[in-house]
Image: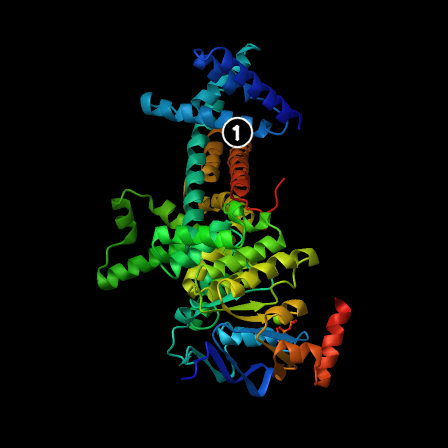
């Protein structure tokens, strides 16, 4: 028996007014359990749009998304149920500014998962140990560095025990010296907890080390996909070559 | 910094004293208490306000004990003592002064209560309106209705609104009584022990301030970055949960300063209720003026308005700082 993909996208397109952010015939993609899929591509190529369509933060124009074999792009599905199992970490961290670190993690556990109090407390303590921020439990996001905020954001998602986690450029808003701490937490999720991740990032070393597959997007299409070795060591695609040399220049 | 070091000095002194002799707890308490009392230029306003409130409070307690007394009597007494130093008293200067001060004090309380109730009720209505206004799609009809409401009350004079509510409601109630036998509203309200004019006047103020507050809250909601909504929804919170646990709590912290302005606006606007016979501060000063022929009546009224408005702004400033959260909008000094 073949294993079922955690998430599968079939012919997904998205139009904003007249602009095709994801072009027809559409993007198709399968993510298997315990895979780390890295998406790269230049600005405006539709990476964020693809991620957001997969948990329907953006409604796709056409196409289907299946989560654990069940279609979640139908009207009847309760998307809030599905989102319990799909975590998302954003470029801008998006911690709730009026809540302390502890309360940020608590809110979805209490209001969405409706866990009992002792379980909530246990999970908060546990995930803060994982991201190494136990002493900041009563701090407000505004009192933390960018790297610390992003680690809290990861902890908030991790505490939900999702089946898969999306990362949308988690280190792009950070100073270079802070990206390491965030990447190492992400690495921990993969190596220790064997999570399934879909990561949009320009951190080539991270992709080389952890990615099972790399997907290159350009102008609303998937241009190239393959194992990290193929993509980074001997890219056979012209556009991909150009993009990679640009990235290398920047770093 | 200087104040801080002084405070720590006192603290250490107290600590030393505790070590020396822990039987004199009272002495330590007194020292700690008075050690913290320090009048500086910065907290002078608070001292005045605190003293004023203390005197008014004493006065209020006194009204419960002494019949026919006014809550402002202790303040008048203090002024009297002060004048006594120069061989005068208020009554001796002009027998009308104490009467005016007392009469207007009662009216000022009424103005104060009317505006407080109006702002509080208006806030509830405004929060509902604002949520409808920022709602994307769905309740479309409601949205137009809410927008029309806000536009109407913000683009017509308050005085006209007050007259419209007062005469409109009265007229409609009469008509309903004639055709359907529904009891006349003014009777219903007076049976409940309320004043008809005050009730309808407050209603007009509520409707008006709700429109302004709705705009304030709407702008506040829109000022919250969309990332907050995105993160909340991505975690599985429903639209309603996102509003109540993420957006509105942040909004309310952002809108404290503009709402302060609105409370003061309502207080000052409440003077228009004099036109429908509510004996609030303005109406009372006019009637006192017509009896005593003293223009100073209006000066006293102005001072009363000022004291209330100033105290309110002081308190909300305090609230603003209390509610402040690092990294969230509201500036302070
Ligand atoms: N809400 C929107 N309305 C209109 N156009 C949009 C909207 N969101 C995205 N777009 C457009 O869709 C295209 C793809 O955007 P997207 O955010 O997915 O790019 P991206 O690959 O994530 O880029 P970046 O690396 O800059 O984050 C862009 O050209 C953008 O202008
Ligand atoms: Mg993006």
Q: Image quadrant for the N terminus of chain B?
A: top right
Q: Nearer the viewer, residue B148 or A192?
A: A192
Label 1 lies in ligand 1 vicinity (Cβ under 8 Å)? no
Between A140 and B294, the residue placed more toward the observer is A140
Q: At x 32% / y 21%, what residue is drawn? A: B65
Question: Quarter of the picture for ligand 1?
Answer: bottom right
- Give the answer, above or below, for where B54 lies relative to B307: above
Q: Does residue B145 appear in this view?
A: yes
Q: Position of residue B10 (x, y in %)?
A: 58, 19
Q: Judge by depth and name the residue closer to the eye, A112 or B279.
A: A112
> How far from the left and from the top, in percent, is residue B15?
53, 18
Question: Is B121 above or below relative to B25?
Answer: below
Image side of residue A19 versus residue B133, left or right: right
Q: Nearer the viewer, residue B39 or A188?
A: A188
- Quadrant in the rendering for residue B179: bottom left
Side of A161 where A17 appears, left or right: right
Q: Is residue B209 visible to the viewer in this orientation of the structure? A: no
**Residue drawn at (47%, 45%), measured in percent from left and top?**
B270
Q: Could you tell me which quadrant the C terminus of chain B lies in?
A: top right
Q: Which residue is mark 1?
A: B49
* Residue occupying the point 34% across, 54% down: A116
- Please report, as a chain letter, where disc 1 is located: B
10 Å neighbourhood of mark 1: few (<14), some, or many (≥20)? some
* Kind of element beneath mark 1: helix
Residue B138 screen position, x and y as percent:
43, 73
The residue lying at 48 percent from left, 39 percent from top is: B282
Question: Vertical placement of A164 versus A137: above or below?
Answer: below
């Amino acid at each position: 028996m073949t294993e079922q993909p955690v998430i599968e996208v079939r012919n997904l397109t998205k139009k904003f007014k007249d602009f095709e952010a994801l072009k027809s015939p559409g993007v198709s993609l399968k993510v298997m359990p315990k895979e780390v899929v890295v998406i790269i591509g230049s600005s405006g190529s539709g990476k964020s749009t693809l991620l957001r369509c997969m948990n329907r933060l953006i409604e796709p124009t056409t196409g289907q998304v299946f989560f654990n074999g069940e279609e979640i792009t139908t009207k009847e599905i309760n998307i809030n149920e599905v989102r319990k199992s799909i975590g998302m970490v954003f470029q801008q961290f998006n911690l709730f500014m009026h809540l302390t670190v502890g309360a940020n993690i608590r809110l979805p556990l209490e209001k969405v998962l409706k866990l009992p109090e002792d379980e909530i407390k246990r999970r908060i303590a546990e995930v803060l140990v994982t991201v190494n921020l136990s002493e900041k439990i009563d701090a407000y996001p505004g009192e933390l560095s960018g790297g610390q905020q992003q680690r809290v954001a990861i902890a908030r998602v991790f505490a939900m025990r999702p089946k898969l986690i999306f990362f949308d450029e988690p280190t792009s808003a950070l100073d270079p010296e802070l990206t390491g701490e965030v990447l190492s937490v992400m690495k921990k999720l993969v190596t220790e907890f064997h999570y399934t991740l879909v990561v949009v990032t320009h951190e080539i070393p991270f992709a080389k080390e952890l990615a099972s597959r790399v997907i290159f997007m350009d102008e609303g299409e998937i241009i190239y996909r393959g194992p990290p070795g193929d993509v980074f060591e001997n890219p056979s695609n012209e556009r991909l070559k150009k993009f990679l040399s640009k990235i290398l220049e920047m770093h | 910094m200087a104040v801080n070091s002084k405070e720590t000095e006192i603290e250490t002194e107290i600590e030393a004293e505790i070590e020396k002799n822990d039987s004199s707890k009272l002495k330590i308490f007194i020292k700690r208490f008075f050690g913290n009392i320090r009048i500086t230029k910065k907290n002078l306003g608070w001292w005045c306000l605190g003293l004023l409130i203390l005197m008014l409070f004493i006065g209020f307690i006194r009204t419960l004990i002494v019949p026919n007394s006014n809550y402002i009597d202790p303040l008048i007494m203090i002024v009297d003592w002060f004048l006594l130093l120069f061989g005068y008293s208020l009554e001796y200067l002009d027998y009308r002064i104490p009467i005016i001060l007392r009469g207007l004090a009662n009216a000022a309380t009424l103005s104060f209560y009317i505006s407080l109730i109006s702002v509080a009720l208006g806030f509830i209505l405004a929060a509902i309106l604002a949520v409808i206004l920022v709602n994307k799609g769905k309740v479309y009809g409601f949205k137009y209705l809410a927008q029309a409401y806000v536009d109407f009350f913000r683009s017509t004079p308050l005085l006209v609104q007050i007259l419209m509510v007062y005469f409109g409601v009265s007229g409609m109630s009469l008509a309903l009584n004639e055709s359907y036998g529904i009891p006349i509203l003014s009777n219903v309200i007076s049976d409940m022990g309320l004043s008809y004019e005050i009730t309808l006047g407050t209603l007009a103020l509520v409707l008006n301030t709700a429109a302004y507050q709705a705009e304030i809250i709407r702008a506040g909601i829109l000022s919250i970055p969309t990332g907050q909504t995105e993160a909340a929804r991505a975690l599985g919170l429903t639209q309603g949960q996102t509003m109540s646990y993420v957006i509105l709590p942040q909004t309310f912290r952002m809108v404290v300063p503009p709402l302060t302005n609105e409370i003061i606006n309502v207080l000052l606007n409440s003077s228009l209720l004099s036109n429908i016979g509510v004996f609030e501060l303005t109406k009372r000063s006019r009637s006192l003026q017509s009896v005593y022929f003293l223009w100073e009546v209006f000066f006293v009224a102005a001072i009363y308005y000022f004291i209330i408005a100033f105290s309110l702004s002081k308190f909300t400033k305090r609230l603003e700082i209390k509610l402040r959260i690092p990294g969230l909008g509201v500036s302070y000094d």
